[in-house]
């Protein structure tokens, strides 16, 4: 028989090719059509450039570092930005997340005695529905959760110092990733305890290593802070208000919640190819099982602990509310567990994979290669349509204020949501100054000390020149379906126009606020 390393040698170049393809959507396009990304990235921009005169942020914001989850993404981008700037730093962190998903799957195949080829099925999961919504802090939290749980699994199997340090450090990092990542971790640990059945001393050491992270998270959640309480105008009524979607709805939209990334049906077709491949591989593994092996429930639970984790994530998908209204607004909560359920479910198939059996992975391999290339082409097309916007922002004189407006429809053919409703944050990232779009009501990295007038980012057609235009030097508008200034005389005149984009410049200086 060939050594295991020799048999697995063809896997390495395949994994590297898929990894390179997986990064194509991030690096092919400058601006990604991800819903919440502009607001998240502008928060880092404000924190990173608050003292830079060219950015002119000090008169609008003051920075703070709240000790809450979400910080992992923000601080990683901030640290890399010192060397490469905000935009490239963001892409580096995004790339690390995208590669972390298949790498975590690769680690888990080793932990559970599975073929490394199973990690191929996890490549597309990085471009989940949560990715398309720009939930970067959550995505970073997912990656930290997967590696933290793998470290716990390794420590329970063999309590070495390296594993202990990994559990302690990754557990703390997970607490700064995202609250749902923390919830996933502390609900998954009992599953691993059930699978490993550790001796009391090993159990105590494991819980002791996780205690600092648990205590930190409890303090983060329970201490008084603005973001975790209902606003004063909502003081009456129940303190917690949430909404569950019917089970039928959650089941029907499970594929979309997992892999609906761009417009069209290719991403959902890819989902079904991955599911079919996992089922086929599971059947092949069952048929190849050694029938003479002695069955025990303890051994079964240990061998199929990935299946238990998949069931746990599926349970959270249905049990966690879809949306919270109080004590704070939080959309698409329970739905975020769909890709995690698939991640662990794809690790269930067993059996050795060599020879002709490798061809069972051909459909999943094609999906893992084709899907990111398709996404990157959609992102590139979006950037072609947004190129006039970038050029117009670059045209504005330094030290000026720009008001961005996108009229209905605020969608783009590349994606399925109103991707332009937070585009004002990109004006800030590219030009500096104030942005009317941002995380003003959360424990972000900043507090607003002075606002400039602007219509709500979801109702930009409410623009009124008498109310909103006063302090601005420029107005950039997309889809100007009716004249911004009507027939009345205006200090603004059209200076640039391309496609659906127009740029107006003020004659003279803005009026005082």
Image (tube, rainbow, N blue to C red):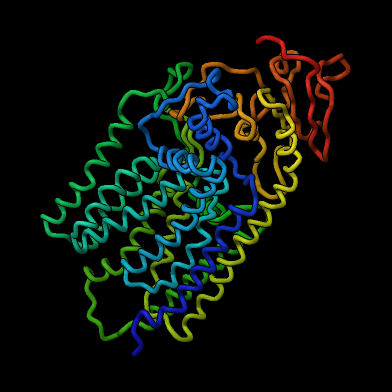
Query: On the rendered image, what quadrant is the C terminus found in?
Result: top right
Task: Establish if 234 lies above or below 219.
Answer: above
Question: What is the residue that sits farthest to the top in this orientation?
Answer: 512
Q: Residue at 55% of width from left, 56% of height from top? A: 259
Q: Residue at x 74, y 30 (%)?
A: 476
Q: Is residue 289 above or below residue 496?
A: below
User: In this rendering, would 494 be left or right of 102?
Assistant: right
Q: Quadrant of the N terminus?
A: bottom left
317 sits left or right of 253 in the view: left
Res 186 seen here: no
Q: Quadrant of residue 52?
A: top right
Residue 509 x, y percent position in the rendering: 74, 14
Image x and y of residue 474, in percent? 74, 24
Viewer-proximal residue among 95 and 276: 95
Q: Position of residue 364 (x, y in %)?
A: 54, 70
Q: Quadrant of residue 282?
A: bottom left
Residue that protrudes farthest toward the bottom in the picture: 1
Task: Name the residue: 45% across, 44% down.
Answer: 138
Q: Nearer the viewer, residue 155 or 397?
A: 397
Answer with left or right where residue 123 lies relative to residue 392.
Answer: left
Q: Is residue 497 visible?
A: yes
Question: Is 204 above or below relative to 348?
Answer: above
Q: Residue at x 67, y 37 (%)?
A: 420
């Amino acid at each position: 028989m060939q050594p295991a390393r020799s048999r697995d040698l063809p896997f390495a170049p395949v994994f590297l090719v898929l990894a390179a393809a997986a990064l194509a959507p991030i690096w092919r396009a400058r601006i990604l059509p991800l819903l919440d990304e502009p607001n998240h990235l502008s928060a880092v921009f404000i924190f990173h450039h608050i003292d830079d005169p060219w950015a002119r942020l000090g008169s609008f914001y003051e920075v703070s570092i709240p000790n809450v989850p979400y910080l992992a993404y923000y601080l990683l981008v901030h640290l890399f930005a010192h060397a490469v700037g905000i935009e490239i730093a963001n892409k580096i962190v995004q790339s690390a997340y995208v590669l972390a998903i298949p790498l975590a799957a690769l680690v888990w195949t080793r932990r559970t005695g599975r073929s490394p080829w199973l990690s191929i099925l996890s490549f597309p999961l990085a471009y989940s529905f949560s990715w398309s919504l720009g939930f970067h802090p959550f995505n970073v939290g997912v990656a930290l959760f997967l590696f933290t749980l793998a470290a716990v699994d390794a420590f329970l199997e063999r309590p070495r110092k390296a594993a202990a340090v990994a559990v302690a450090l990754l557990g703390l990092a997970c607490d700064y990733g995202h609250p749902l990542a923390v919830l996933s971790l502390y609900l998954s640990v009992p599953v691993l305890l059930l699978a490993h059945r550790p001796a009391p001393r090993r159990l105590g050491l494991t819980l002791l290593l996780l205690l600092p992270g648990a205590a930190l998270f409890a303090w983060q959640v329970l201490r008084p802070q603005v973001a975790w309480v209902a606003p004063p105008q909502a003081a009456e009524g129940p303190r917690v208000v949430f909404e569950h979607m019917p089970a039928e709805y959650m089941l029907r939209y499970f594929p979309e919640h997992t892999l609906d990334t761009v417009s069209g049906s290719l991403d959902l077709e890819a989902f079904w190819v991955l599911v079919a491949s996992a089922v086929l591989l599971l059947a092949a593994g069952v048929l190849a099982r050694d029938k003479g092996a002695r069955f025990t429930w303890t051994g079964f639970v240990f061998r199929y602990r990935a299946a238990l984790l998949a069931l746990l994530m599926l349970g959270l998908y249905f049990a966690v509310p879809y949306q919270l209204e109080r004590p704070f607004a939080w959309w698409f909560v329970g739905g975020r567990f769909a890709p995690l359920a698939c991640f662990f479910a794809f690790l269930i198939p067993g059996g050795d994979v060599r020879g002709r059996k490798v061809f069972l992975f051909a459909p999943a391999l094609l999906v893992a290669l084709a899907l990111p290339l398709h996404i990157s082409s959609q992102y590139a097309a979006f950037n072609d349509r947004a190129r006039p916007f970038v050029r117009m922002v670059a045209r504005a004189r330094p030290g000026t204020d720009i008001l961005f407006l996108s009229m209905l429809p605020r969608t783009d053919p590349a994606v399925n949501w109103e991707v332009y409703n937070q585009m004002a944050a990109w004006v800030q990232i590219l030009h500096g100054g104030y942005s009317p779009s941002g995380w003003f009501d959360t424990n972000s990295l900043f507090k607003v000390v002075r606002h400039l007038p602007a219509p709500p980012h979801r109702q930009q057609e409410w623009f009124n020149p008498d109310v909103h235009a006063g302090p601005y030097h420029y107005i950039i508008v997309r889809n100007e379906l009716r004249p911004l200034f009507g027939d009345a005389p205006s200090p603004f005149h059209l200076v640039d126009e391309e496609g659906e984009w127009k740029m107006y410049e003020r004659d003279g200086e803005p009026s005082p606020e």
